[in-house]
Image (cartoon, grey):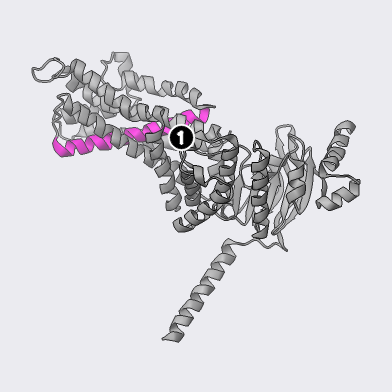
């Protein structure tokens, strides 16, 4: 009898492992994201221009660039919102053009604007997105309570989002994006409009995602945010990747005091050169 | 099928009905108040013609249709607002399919239309309306109203595909609401408007409900023909509405 139970448990474990392998397909030689010759054209405007980039599994990668550089378009191609004109993008081992359904199961997206249902409270908003990702109800509750507490929203969790400040909406935006415990998180300017204290708390929270071995793709205008959090930084302008490296490598290469200096050096020069 | 996501969406849309004053007024209070006002003005209680059939008895079936027609506006407003606030894009990056998402809205509006019809029916009875046709007549009337609501959801989707904001959606939805109100409910028709009415789903529904509530056989050829026509209309409108919304409506 004991043997039977053991064999059933073993077979259950096997099934779980098999399933998790299928659902968590990510390894493409250790890369969570592979972008190859990616192009996005809108009529005669080229938003992304032959972008090539590989992001390692478990890496916190920041995508920097001036306004209209192509950061959000790139993110939107990776999460399936925008179809690329040319090239390929592999997210978590799946091609975004052919296997978008599988991509959506692996990702969490925190959009640039705080997209929340204003007539719902924080808990209801988060629960809805847990439901959309088919997360177990008990798990949703546990995870939601943990995230809301970490970001200091527990006290306001039963208040309708309509009454939230800009910073609180931003925090809720992040919690909603992470309720499915995604393997890959896209955070598009997550701390815009937050006061410095809230921003620091959010940085800590984003940093903790790295400890959980999640791949985080962060776009931000706060260069110090990228410098403090990122393993590597990619600077994009006119839809092209113009610099790539760890903050340390870039500081050394440009003999700069901080990443902002590097950023201005690269993008400023390009503006002056009229590229 | 992602039932968890589907029910989650239905739940929040129903919460919206209660929590958003504009939606609550448009969907529930407006039809109820309209029924009360018309009932008091033209019904037996308000001193209308009490000998046999009074004006309110003639108007009541059109009032049922009125309630469902206004779904066009609330659906269009709701989709346009959600798109403007970036919620459609956000939902679009979750594993729920667009069919499941639109399905949740269709189911929600079916539920709302049932509540509306129950309200209008109760207030009509309160105002002295005594329909013939028995329980099955009422059931058939409900079926017709639900199909009319489907048409309204489709027209709402069409409106939301064109409109850039919730406010614009309200204006555009009038293109679909007003002809149905004036030519497809209880107002007398001229030979010209009668031709227009033949293209309006509310006309068939009001006509059938009028027949049912005045004692016609619920499975009579005329009612079944109306049911068929309005069902085909609903299918076509929903198909075009979903297609248009998927193509033009879900993007900002």
Residue at image x 33%, y 32%?
A: B148
The numbered mark 1 sits on a residue in which chain?
B
Extreme residue in the left direction: B51
Question: Is-magenta flag for residue B178?
Answer: no
Instruction: Work out whether residue B224 can be spotted.
Output: no
Residue A94 vertical position relative to residue A193 in the rendered view, above or below: below
In the image, is A197 to the left or to the right of A248?
A: left
Residue B70 vertical position relative to residue A122 in the rendered view, above or below: above
Bounds of the magenta segment: B134-163
Residue count near mark 1 (Cα–Cα under 10 Å), binned few <14, some 14–19, many ≥20: some
In the image, is A29 to the left or to the right of B45?
A: right
Measuring from the top left, give residue B94's x and y in whole percent.
Answer: 54, 48
Residue at image x 25%, y 34%?
A: B118
Q: Nearer the viewer, residue A80 or A202?
A: A202
Instruction: Work out whether residue A146 can be spotted.
Output: yes
In the image, is A237 to the left or to the right of A104?
A: right
Quarter containing the N terminus of chain A: bottom left
Q: Nearer the viewer, residue B200 or B80?
A: B80
Q: Quadrant of residue B133?
A: top left
In the image, is A146 to the left or to the right of B151?
A: right
Quarter containing the C terminus of chain A: top right
Q: Quadrant of residue B140?
A: top left
Residue at image x 59%, y 43%?
A: A171
Measuring from the top left, give residue A148's x and y in whole percent.
Answer: 54, 49
Q: Nearer the viewer, residue B26 or A261?
A: A261
Measuring from the top left, give residue A154's x and y in whole percent.
Answer: 51, 47
**Secondary structure at numbered mark 1:** helix
Residue A275 vertical position relative to residue A253 in the rendered view, above or below: above
Measuring from the top left, give residue B125's x and y in whole percent.
Answer: 17, 28
Residue at image x 61%, y 41%?
A: A111
Majority SS type along the magenta span: helix
- Residue at the disc numbered 1: B240
């Amino acid at each position: 009898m004991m043997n039977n139970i053991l064999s059933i448990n073993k077979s259950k474990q096997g099934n779980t492992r098999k399933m998790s392998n299928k659902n968590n397909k990510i390894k493409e030689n250790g890369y969570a994201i592979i972008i190859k010759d990616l192009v996005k054209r809108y009529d005669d405007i080229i938003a992304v221009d032959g972008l090539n980039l590989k992001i390692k599994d478990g890496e916190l990668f920041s995508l920097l660039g001036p306004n209209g550089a192509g950061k959000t378009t790139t993110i939107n191609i990776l999460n399936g919102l925008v179809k690329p004109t040319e090239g390929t993008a592999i997210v978590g081992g799946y091609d975004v053009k052919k296997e978008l359904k599988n991509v959506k199961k692996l990702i969490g997206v925190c959009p640039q604007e705080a997209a929340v249902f204003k007539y719902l409270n924080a808990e209801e908003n988060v629960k809805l997105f847990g439901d959309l990702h088919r997360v177990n109800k008990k798990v949703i509750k546990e995870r939601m309570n943990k995230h809301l507490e970490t970001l200091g929203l527990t006290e306001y969790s039963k208040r309708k989002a309509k009454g939230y400040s800009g910073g609180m909406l931003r925090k809720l935006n992040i919690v909603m994006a992470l309720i499915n415990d995604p393997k890959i998180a896209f955070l598009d300017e997550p701390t815009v409009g937050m006061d410095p204290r809230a921003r620091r708390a959010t940085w800590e929270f984003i940093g903790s995602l790295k400890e959980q071995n999640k791949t985080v793709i962060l776009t931000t205008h706060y260069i110090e945010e990228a410098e403090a959090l990122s393993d590597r930084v990619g600077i994009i302008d006119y839809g092209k990747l113009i610099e790539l490296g760890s903050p340390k490598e870039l500081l050394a290469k440009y003999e700069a005091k901080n990443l902002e200096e590097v950023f201005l050096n690269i993008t400023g020069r390009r503006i002056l050169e009229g590229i | 099928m992602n039932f968890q996501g589907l029910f989650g969406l239905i739940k929040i849309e129903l919460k919206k009905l209660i929590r958003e004053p504009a939606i609550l007024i448009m969907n529930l209070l407006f039809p109820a108040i309209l029924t009360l006002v018309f009932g008091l003005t033209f019904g037996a209680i308000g001193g209308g013609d009490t000998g046999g059939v009074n004006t309110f008895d003639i108007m009541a079936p059109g009032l049922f249709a009125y309630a469902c027609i206004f779904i066009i506006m609330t659906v269009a407003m709701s989709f346009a607002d959600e798109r403007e606030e970036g919620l459609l894009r956000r939902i679009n990056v979750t594993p729920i399919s667009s069919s499941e998402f639109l399905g949740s809205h269709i189911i929600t509006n079916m539920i709302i239309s049932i509540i509306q019809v129950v309200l209008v029916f109760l207030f009509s009875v309160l105002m002295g309306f005594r329909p013939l046709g028995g329980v099955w007549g009422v059931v058939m009337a409900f079926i017709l109203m639900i199909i009319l609501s489907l048409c309204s959801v489709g027209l709402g989707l069409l409106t939301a595909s064109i409109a850039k904001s919730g406010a614009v959606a309200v204006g555009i939805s009038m293109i679909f609401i007003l002809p149905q109100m004036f030519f497809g409910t209880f107002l007398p028709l001229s030979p010209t408007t009668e031709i227009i009415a033949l293209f309006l789903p509310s006309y068939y529904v009001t006509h059938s409900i009028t027949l049912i509530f005045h004692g016609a056989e619920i499975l009579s050829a005329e009612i079944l023909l109306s049911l068929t026509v309005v069902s085909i209309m609903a299918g076509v409108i929903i198909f075009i509405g979903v297609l248009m919304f998927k193509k033009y409506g879900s993007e900002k």
